[in-house]
Image (cartoon, grey):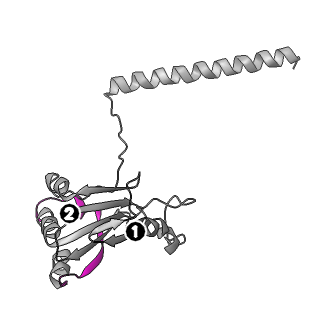
Amino acid sequence: MFLVHIMALLKDGGRCGLVLPDGFLFGTGVKSAIKKKLLEECDLHTIVRLPKSVFAPYTSINTNLLFFTKGRPTKGVWFYRLEMPKGYKHFSKTKPMLDSHFTPVENWWGKLENGIWKGRSESEISRYVPVEDLIAGEYNLDLCGFPRETVEILPPGEFIAKYLNEKAAVSAHIENILGRITAAMNQRGV
C-alpha cells in the first residue's frame, strides 16, 4: 500500500501529512497490519476528519488527514472532526472548501513541547485516545465521527403502533388548537 512506501521513504524524524479515505481507518486484515506498523514505527499524533463532500463532485467518501512523524512509536492519537462551516450544507465545484474553513483546526492545533501537545483539549469534536485503546480495538482508527447518533430500529408492528400513537397525539393537539381558535373567533363575533 501507498502508506508503507511513504513510511519507508521517510527518515527518522521525517514528518508526513497524508489524505486517506475512511476505508483504511477501519479496515482489517492487511490494513490492520499496516496500521500496526504505522503505530509502532511512527508517532501518528493526529487524525482530522474532513467534511464528507470536501472532494465533491469527484467522490463523496469521507476523507481524513493523518499526521505522523517517523522514528518513535505512537503514544496516543488526537482525533478532530472538522465540522461543515455555517451556511454550507455541502461543498461543490461552485462552493468549494476554502482555506478559512480550516481555521478551527489551526486554532485547536497547539504546539508540541517535549512530546506533549500543548493547547489541545477534548471537546465535542476532538478527543485523545491512548495507543493501548487503539490496539485493544484491533487498530480501528475510525474514531473521528463521535458522537455517533443511534437510531432505534423497531420491529414493524412496534414501529406502526408507535407511529399511530404519535399521529393520534399530533391530531389531538391540532384539534385542541383549532377548538381554541374557533372559540376565540366566536367570542369576537368573527
Q: Which residue in the protein does label 2 denote?
A: 75
Closer to us: 169 or 11: 11
Q: Quarter of the image containing the C terminus?
A: top right
Q: Quadrant of residue 19?
A: bottom left
Q: Under tag 2, what secondary structure?
A: loop
Discs 1, 2 touching: Cβ within 8 Å: no
Closer to us: 57 or 14: 14
Q: Is residue 165 left or right of residue 78?
A: right
Q: Position of residue 79 (x, y in %)?
A: 32, 60
Q: Quadrant of residue 75?
A: bottom left
Closer to us: 185 or 117: 117
Q: Mark 2 or mark 1, which is nearer the start of the sequence? A: 2
Q: Quadrant of residue 74?
A: bottom left
Mark 1 crowdedness (10 Å alpha carbons): few <14, some 14-19, many ≥20: some
* Stretch of the chain drawn in magenta: 10-30
Q: Is residue 4 above or below residue 133?
A: below
Closer to us: 189 or 109: 109
Q: Which residue type does callout 1 highlight?
A: Gly
Q: Disc 1 versus disc 2: distance between alpha carbons?
A: 17 Å
Q: Under tag 1, what secondary structure?
A: loop
Q: Position of residue 17 (x, y in %)?
A: 31, 76
Q: Is residue 108 left or right of residue 145?
A: right
Residue 127 among magenta residues: no
Q: Position of residue 87 (x, y in %)?
A: 58, 59
Residue 16 among magenta residues: yes
Q: Which residue in the protein does label 1 denote?
A: 110
